[in-house]
Amino acid sequence: MKVSDFVEGKLMEIGATPEYTGYKYLVCAIVMSMQNEYLLNNVTTKMYPAIGKRYGVSPASIERSIRTVISAIWYDGDPELLRKLMGRSYPVQPGNAKFIGVVSRRLSFYCRRNAETGKISGQANI
C-alpha cells in the first residue's frame, strides 16, 4: 500500500472528506513531512510553496485550505478516533503545523514499527 493511500485512509477515518480542496493538500503535507521531518520547521517557507507549485496555487491558498479541512475534522469528525490518532486530547484545535506534525509523526512511527511485516494495516490501533 502506498503511504499516501494509508494517510488518506486515516484522514477519512477521523472525518476528513475529499470534497474539501485542502484534503489533497493536507495529504501531501503529511506525506512530505513523513519523508522529510525538516519540513515541519519550515511549513510556511518550504512546505506550502512546494505544495502550491505542485498544484498551481499560492502558498496562502494552501494554508487556508488546509486550515479549513482541519477545522472540519475538528468539529465534525470522530473525536475518539481523532484522539487516538493524535495520541491525546487537545483542548483547542491545533494550528496547521501542529496538526501536520503530530499526525505525520504518529503515522511515521506506525509505518516504521510495521515495516518488517511489509504491510500497512488500515485497521491499526493508532
Image (tube, rainbow, N blue to C red):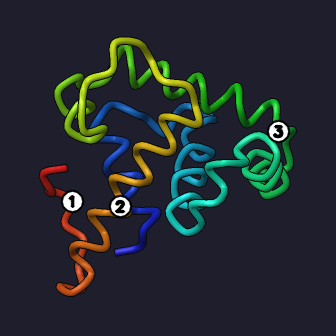
Q: Are marks 1 and 2 in contact (CB under 8 Å)?
A: yes
Residue 43 picture location, percent across and down: 70, 44
Q: Is mark 3 on a helix, strand or loop?
A: helix
Up the image or down, 81 lies above or below 89; here it is: below
Q: Is residue 110 left or right of residue 5?
A: left
Alpha-carbon neighbours of circle 1 within 10 Å: few (<14), some, or many (≥20)? some
Alpha-carbon neighbours of circle 2 within 10 Å: few (<14), some, or many (≥20)? some
Residue 100 picture location, percent across and down: 51, 42
How far apart are labels 1 and 2 at the CA level? Answer: 7 Å
Residue that numbered label 2 is attached to = 6
Checking the image for residue 57, the label placed there is none
Q: What element carries label 2?
A: helix
Give whichever of discs 1 and 2 has the lower sequence position: 2
Residue type marked 2: Phe
Give whichever of discs 3 and 1 has the lower sequence position: 3
Residue depicted at 34% across the width and 57% down the height: 107
Q: Is residue 21 left or right of residue 49?
A: left
Checking the image for residue 59, the label placed there is 3
Residue type marked 3: Pro
Residue type marked 1: Gly
| Location of residue 22 (image quadrant) | top right
Checking the image for residue 122, the label placed there is 1
Residue depicted at 34% across the width and 12% down the height: 91
| Location of residue 92 (image quadrant) | top left
Give whichever of discs 3 and 2 has the lower sequence position: 2
User: As rendered, which of 20 and 36 lies closer to the eye?
Assistant: 36
